Amino acid sequence: MGPIVVDVGNSRIKWGLCSSAQVWSIAALPGDDAAAWQKQWLEWKLEPAQEWIVSGVHPLRRDVLVAWIKERCDAVQVLTTPKQVPLQIDVEYPDRVGIDRLLNAVAANVRRQENVAAILVDAGSAVTVDYVDGKGVFRGGAIFPGLRLMAQALHDHTALLPIVEIDDAVALPGTTSVKAIQAGVLYAVIGGIERLITEYQHRHPAAFEIFLTGGDAKSIAPRLHHPVHLWPEMTLEGILHSRPR
């Protein structure tokens, strides 16, 4: 068995059970529920000698989880900076780029075709749409609110609009306020992704592949006009391929 890789997000924590080369099982767990972590530990029959590699965009939750793991085993590596990631980065402030975005690029460089660029879409609490050129260099990208964050903002900053859940049964036109918000939020996110892909294609006219991950990826993928590789394990595989040697 390979290491356990962990991505600590803003909404949840994902554990990946690995072979030496890829992630073959994922567990999505609450960010602050040690009982759920312990249950998963037992379900996967983990041992104190198990190697762990942890990263993520929520430092407080990450550090709490790392402390919990260290109570049970000794082999824990934490990825926190671009210097730990096997990736060329060409942006103004590399140290300020979310580590999850860089890890997605590491994973894409393993899978993309040679000399073919990659557009990396991560649809979670925030949506990131990043660009990796044909030489594998991370060039930066765009960030905007995800489905739930956008819906929450509508509720928080208006007097009457309700908080809504975005599901796969969104219809157009929306015939109630709830349905209209669901449609507006979903298609605003889809439209943002599609427009960014078009802009990358226009500004960097070269062959490219699109990789899509994140908690809302399954809802978004069928509605995109561009062909995409749906890849739930992308960030976790980036952690695996950044494994300290």
Image (cartoon, rainbow, N blue to C red):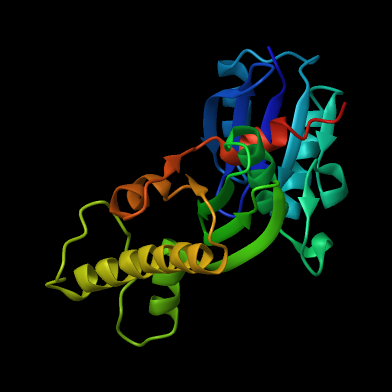
Q: Where is residue 174, by image quadrant?
A: bottom left
Q: Residue at x 43, y 71 (%)?
A: 150
Task: Please give left or right for residue 145 compared with residue 101 in the image.
Answer: left
Q: Where's residue 103, x and y in %? A: 69, 44
Q: Is residue 67 above or below residue 117?
A: above
Would residue 84 appear left or right of 19 to someone viewing this image?
right
**What residue lies at 59% left-to-right and 16% top-to-bottom?**
44
Between 31 and 168, the one lying in front of the other is 168
**Residue found 79% across the figure and 30% down from its top:** 243
Residue most toward the bottom? 159
Query: Can residue 34 be seen in this snapshot?
Result: no
Tell me if residue 124 can be seen. Answer: yes
Residue that protrudes farthest toward the left in the picture: 175
Name the residue: 52% across, 61% down. 127
Question: Residue 113: horizontal and vertical position, in percent?
Answer: 57, 36
Q: Quadrant of the N terminus?
A: top right
185 relative position to 76: left or right = left
Q: Position of residue 21 (x, y in %)?
A: 66, 20
Please tell me how many numbered marks the rendered image carries. Answer: 0
Q: Is residue 70 above or below residue 162?
A: above
Vertical placement of residue 117 versus 174, above or below? above
Name the one closer to the observer, 20 or 160: 20
Q: Position of residue 15 (x, y in %)?
A: 61, 32
Q: Nearer the viewer, residue 224 or 178?
A: 224
Quadrant of the image containing the C terminus: top right
